[in-house]
Image (cartoon, rainbow, N blue to C red):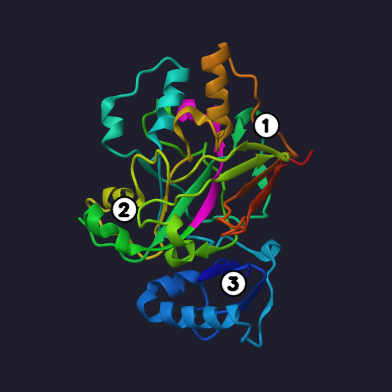
Amino acid sequence: MKLASYKSGRDGQLMIVNRDLNHCCPATGIAATLQAALDDWTGTAPLLAARYDALCAGDIDEAEPFNAERCAAPLPRAYHWADGSAYVTHVELVRKARGAELPSSFWEDPLIYMGASDAFIGARDAIPVESEDWGIDFEAEVVVITDDVPAGIDAQHAGEHIQLLGLVNDVSLRNLIPAELGKQFGFYQSKPWTAFSPVLATPDELGDAWDGQRLHLPLRATLNDKLVGAPNAGVDMTFDFPTLIAHCAKSRSLMAGTVIGSGTVSNVGSESGSCCLAEVRCLETIRDGSPSTPFMAFGDRIHIDMLDAQGASIFGAIDQVVECYTPPGNNS
């Protein structure tokens, strides 16, 4: 099944969306929000699935046209957002561009940080940034949403807790990152709003493309109508999703609604392009000695999508414009 949240209050209104993403209906009487559904997933999932089947069959009287413009993030706020860097080839490339060697441990021990989850934004919401000098970049990623995960679970069993999948644009402010990492305390100011695809899908909706560990489809990133890249998310993913979940749950349990990100999707050699401008600039630096591609500017539009074998969008597209944000008191 496919689920979305229309904008309503802080936590949205849970909507069931049909397979073709053209009709939807509210989850009235089952769960008011996606978080409420996940909190009782064993009880709510069968009820949601039954209504989804009826919606796809055209048997729901209250069905209405689905409007991605009305969507908040499917989880407008989450208890836990952990973003990985599962494509180590991407990390290797970034370090190579600045002349740094990749420690061998990076191939064996996942890189993961805890991100801000108090407020995610919708797929059609603007990307508000105060200054272009901050180095505005998109990052196209795949994410999974879990139910309750017990502490100490191993990777062999962690995949059983993946209930939903989707896409995110994990925006990075590249020029703020070096100073933050230099403090050796992780990202904060350099990671603003994260945007989600309009819908999340259960694993069964993905067919053979989902093997329980990786999603084997290209992730397309298009900037101002120009394709930047379409690397396959199932290729060169050093750490699969069950491994990332087990890593996060090593010393603590994870609550229902935990969001685990793959990090920027990347393939060795970048033959199918890149899912962020930082990687494009690293390739230019390695080849030419310096980058020529600028970071994003106000008015730029980023489009992120994943298509099935028939060319249909699975999760709906993230389609955002970078917008200048003026802080309160700075209106002169």
- Disc 3 versus disc 1: nearer the observer: 3
Look at mark 3 in the image and give the residue it sits on.
17
Q: Between residue 60 and residue 217, name the one nearer to us.
A: 217
Residue 178, magenta (yes or no) = yes
Q: Position of residue 149 (x, y in %)?
A: 29, 62
Residue type at mark 2?
Pro
Q: Which residues are magenta?
A: 166-180
Look at mark 1 in the image and give the residue it sits on.
132
Q: Between residue 219 and residue 216, name the one nearer to us.
A: 216
Considering the image in quadrants, where does the C terminus appear? top right
Q: Are marks 3 and 1 in contact (CB under 8 Å)?
A: no
Residue type at mark 1?
Glu
Residue 16 visible from this viewpoint: yes
Q: Quadrant of residue 109?
A: top left
Q: CA distance from mark 1 to mark 2?
A: 37 Å
- First in sequence, mark 2 or 3: give its number: 3
Q: Are marks 1 and 2 in contact (CB under 8 Å)?
A: no
Residue extending furthest toward the front: 310
- How crowded is the residue under tag 1: few (<14 C-alpha within 10 Å), some, or many (20+)? some
Look at mark 2 in the image and give the residue it sits on.
242
Residue 34, compared with residue 247, is above or below; it is below
- First in sequence, mark 1 or 2: give its number: 1
> As drawn, is 145 to the left or to the right of 158?
right
